[in-house]
Each structure stands twice: as C-alpha cells, then as structure tokens.
Amino acid sequence: MSKRFVAAVVTVGILVGVSVAGSARPRLEFVSQLGGTALAVDVLGDLVVLGEGPRLVTLDISDPANPVEIGRSAALPNHIVDLAATGGYVVAAADLYGLRILSVEDPAHPIEVGAIGPRDSALGVFVAGNIVYIADRYAGVTVVSLEDAADPQIIGSIDLPGRAGSVFVTGDTAYVADGPGGLRVVSVADPRNPVEIGSCETLGDAVAVTIDGAYAYIADQYDAMEIVSVADPAHPVLMGRLSVERPTDIVVVGELAYIATQWSGILVATVADKEQPVELACVDRPRGGQSLAVAGGLLLVADQAYGLSVLSLADPEAPTETGTFDTASYGEDVVVSDDLAYLIDFQEGVHVISVAEPARPEAIGFFPLVEATGFALAGSLGYLCGFDALAILDLSDPTRPVELGRAELPEQTTAVAVDEEYAYVLCPYKGLQVVSIAVQTEPVVIATLPLEGYATDLVLSDDRAYIASGGIHVVSIADPRQPELIGRYESEQISKSLLLNGDRLYFGDGSVLRTFSVEDPSEPVELGHRVLGLGAAIGLHGAYGVLGLEWRGVVVLDLSDPSNPFEITSLDTADRAAGIEIAGDLVYVADHHGGMYILRWVEMESP
C-alpha cells in the first residue's frame, strides 16, 4: 500500500511540467531492482545457488560462518519459486514466466541463456540428465529437453487432477506433489509419453515431495509430513504421519528428516520408524523457512525475507546456525526523500537504500520491526508502524537508524501519517489511533476513533484525514484529541490505498479505481471509475495514474478525464506491486517477492 503522509509529501509524486495527457504517450523503462525473497536454494559442487527475488545469486560457503556472494544474474521477469542445478546450468521455475535456464559456468556472471513458457505456471523443477520435469500447476507435469540449453523444447506432458507444485524423479519414475490430488506417481520411462501408474491420497494439499530409498516424504500444507512407501510405485501405501504446522519442504539425511515450515522454524524428526515419525527438535527461525538443501555437513535454508541461513549438522539432531547471507527483502511500501529510499519490508522492518545512482541502488541501513506495514518521514525522523507498535526513529545517520521511542497499539497496524505533533495510525479493526509525538521518547495514544470496515490507508490535508476503510471516512482532526467523522462514502470492498491531489481523491476500492471530488469534504462526489480486476496502490504523475497492481506490475492510466480513464502502458514486476512512490522521472515500486524496483518515466511524442 502506498502511504502518503502530509500535503507537502503528497506533492513529491506530482511532477511540474509534465506534458498534458494526450500530447505525449509515456512509457516505463526498467532501471534497477534490489532485494526480493529467497524461496529456492540448491548446490552445484562447491557452489551454492540461491533464488533471491527475480535474480539468481551464486555463493561461496567454504567458510560457513561467512557466505560470500560471487555473482548474481540480471533480473528475470518473475521471482524464482524453485530451482535445480546441473552441469554448468541452473534451471529456475518462474511461475507464469515458465522455465528459465541460466549458465553458471562463470559463477561471477550468471547469465540467462534460454527460456520456455509453461503450459500453466512453473512451480517446481527437477533435472535428470538433459531432461527437466516441471510441476506445472493445473497443467500437471511438463517435460522439457535441454539438449540445446539455448532452445529448450517441450517433448512431453501429462495432466493430473490436482495442482502440481513439486516433482522428484528417480530412475524411470516421477513423484508429484499434486496439491489436493495428493501424491501422483508417473512413469517417465518414455519422457515423451509420461503415464500415471499410481497415486496416494494425502490429508488434502501436497506441496512438496522428496524420495529417499523406497519412501516418499510429502509436505502436506494441511499440517503434516506424510511418509509413503513407494517400494511398489504402482501401489504407494501411506505409512505414517507427523503433525507439522504449514510444512514447505523436506530433506532426508539417514534416519532424520529436516522439515521447513512457513512459520514454525525447521523441525528435526526421526523417521527410523516410518509408521511413527517423532519430532526431536525445532530450530527457531523468524519466519520459518521455504526451501532446503544439504551440502556436506551443512543444511542450507532459503529463508524468505531473511536470505540464506547456513546450519551446521555437526550434531544432526540439533542443527545450529553458523552463518547467514541476507540481502533479501519483502517489499510492502516505499518512501523516497532526496537520495534515499526507505523500503518497508513486511517481514523484517525498514531498509534504508541509497539511490544516488538509481541504476545501482545500495542498502546502507536497516531497522528491525515485526510485520512492518507503514512509514512516514518528517525531516530526520521516521515513523514506522508494525505489528502492534509505532516506533519513532532518528534517521540523522541513515546508516544507523536509532529508536527514540515506541507507542504500543491495540493490534496490528496498516498505515501511518504524521502532522506536526501527532501521528495518525490505522489499526484494521480498532480504527484510527491518534498518537502524541510531542515528546519523541514517550509517544502515547491520546484518542481513538472506531471505523466501519477494514482500515488500510490514510492521507492528511489541512485539518482532515481521509481514511480507506469500508469505503472512505472523512475525519476532522481539527482537535486531534477528539477526531470526528464528518463525511462518508460506503463500500463493501476491502480498500487498498488513497491519494489526494488538491480536491481530487483517488481511491482503490477493491478492484476498482475511483476518482472523487472532495471540494465539499462532507460529501465526496464520484467523478468516474475504472475496473482493474486487482487492488491498486496509487501514484500520480501529472494527469496520469501510476498504479501498482497485485500481479500485473505497474500500469499507467490517463486520468485527465476522470469519467473515462484508460490504460496507456504497463511494465510487469516480479510479484505483487504493493507500493508506489514517484520522484522526478523515477517510479519506485515496492514489490512483495521482488523487493524494490526503480523504473524511469519516459515521454514519447504521440504519432
């Protein structure tokens, strides 16, 4: 969600001297990308390969306490959701953008050499020789020949009844975690003509599978690891289950299974008795883990917004963290001031990024806060809201943000705006919280205003707050200690964002962008709307709306006639474009799994 804070800040996104819509047609150019989440990891000899957002990162972990980056690829068109390394190549699953093949013969310069689109969405990959098997979501399994890595070819496929998310091949048999379809067993003796030969129901949503000997280990999203005998692949038999909260991946070493989970860390279980696996330990992780790989005596964890974690297996039953590599981020929102960008990372806090050279953004500072959602900037002070608190930060040294004070709030937060001696914080169910920040070391909640709906965003203007919450609430804050509702536009949709420009209010109402006149704040009047199909974060560039859409990236609309907004151009990002900020001719995008993008606004004369 793109948060705008006070009137002076709102105008940062409104450029002077932009051509009137209709006299020029803008386009967006990619400038740079930074961060993203780590969702996949593998090992190729002495090389570790990590998917970080839309890039492949190569790492040297010869010193496990100090993983060192060797190189990274250019940004791919989507974030990497799975990968597998073979020979001098890494094959990456890139969801709707299919299979991407990267050469790592020069690890310092990984380069994409080939690609092929999916039949649906590439969610998992497995390489056997020069054949790649893709877990292709609702299209089942797609088989691709890598005989020519620069020109991969689909040579076979098989539809399956569920949602293929992971595939593991051993010998002539492929085992597929097929979501609600459970475990599907497919003969690939002839890769051009795969044939299903067996299946086994699971609890409900199989998301990952690994094979060790005669057993399949399945991560079932409905809270279990399941062990299936595949001694006879045509007749798999469920042997045992272990209760696990939200498992995402499994690796097996000897009689121990290491299980990554979405929220509960890395579990260690003994699987010596296949009918009664037993949990031995839990390695606490801030946000669980996503993908696992084993390299010698090390367990490698693709740790989402926390990058790569290296765990020692010196004591196999009690892995201990020995090192980390963290350049990752989960982009929730972004605020720009001069040569600094503040990327709000939902999972970690706020990253301070130097954008003095937009083509080479550099992370220079960081402040941690759980479930960070909103950020406001006032001079050298930052106001960061997170799970249940508002933290006031001294940013006079951007490389070392220092907390000055913290106000406890009644629940999670969604947005913050500041005006002189007050901060206005939204809680989705508890409404507007007014916090006195006159004493920065002792911020305190002084007023609360309940709101209808789920509160998500707010902007301030003069003595009013405009709040997205089950429509629009217009609140008088002439007396911050007694906020008063003075106007309302009702909606049953979950709002996403607001942006105010003069007496025009742009409102992301569910999947619809609406434009209002608030000349009379007590009675917002709709001037027009455009159905987007996805919730939008809103930026403004002259007469154009610059919208971050959840799976479409950045879309530009001509808003010069609010009754007839129409699309001009777009540029896709790696995942969900959640926040937009415009400064000069640059568009900054906070992207969930893609981290931060910087795009350039280019005017082109109309034909």
Image: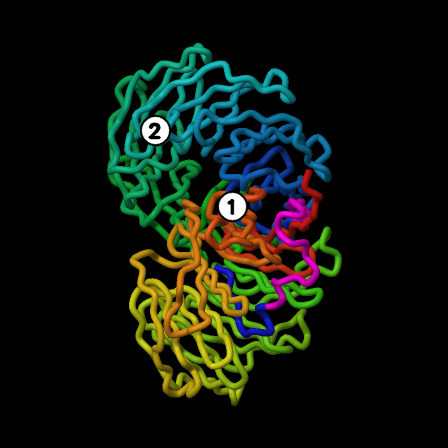
Q: Name the secondary structure under disc 1.
A: strand
Q: Residue 538 carries which label?
A: none
**Residue 276 visible to an observer of this rendering:** yes
Residue 594 covered by magenta stretch:
no
**Residue 67 visible to an observer of this rendering:** no
Q: Which mark is residue 215?
A: 2
Q: In terms of depth relative to the viewer, which is nearer, 457 or 385?
A: 457
In the visual, does 177 lie left or right of 61? Answer: left
> Residue 190 placed where, x, y %?
44, 10
In the visual, does 563 lie left or right of 84? Answer: left
Mark 2 closeness class: few <14, some 14–19, many ≥20 residues within 10 Å: some
Q: Which amino acid does label 1 sit on?
A: Phe
Q: Which residue is tagged 1?
A: 566
The part of the image, by quadrant, that contains residue 236 is top left
Whichever of labels 1 and 2 marks the residue nearer the N terminus, that label is 2
Residue name at image x 54 percent, y 29 percent: 99
Between disc 1 and disc 2, the foreground one is 1
Magenta range: 11-32
Label tally: 2
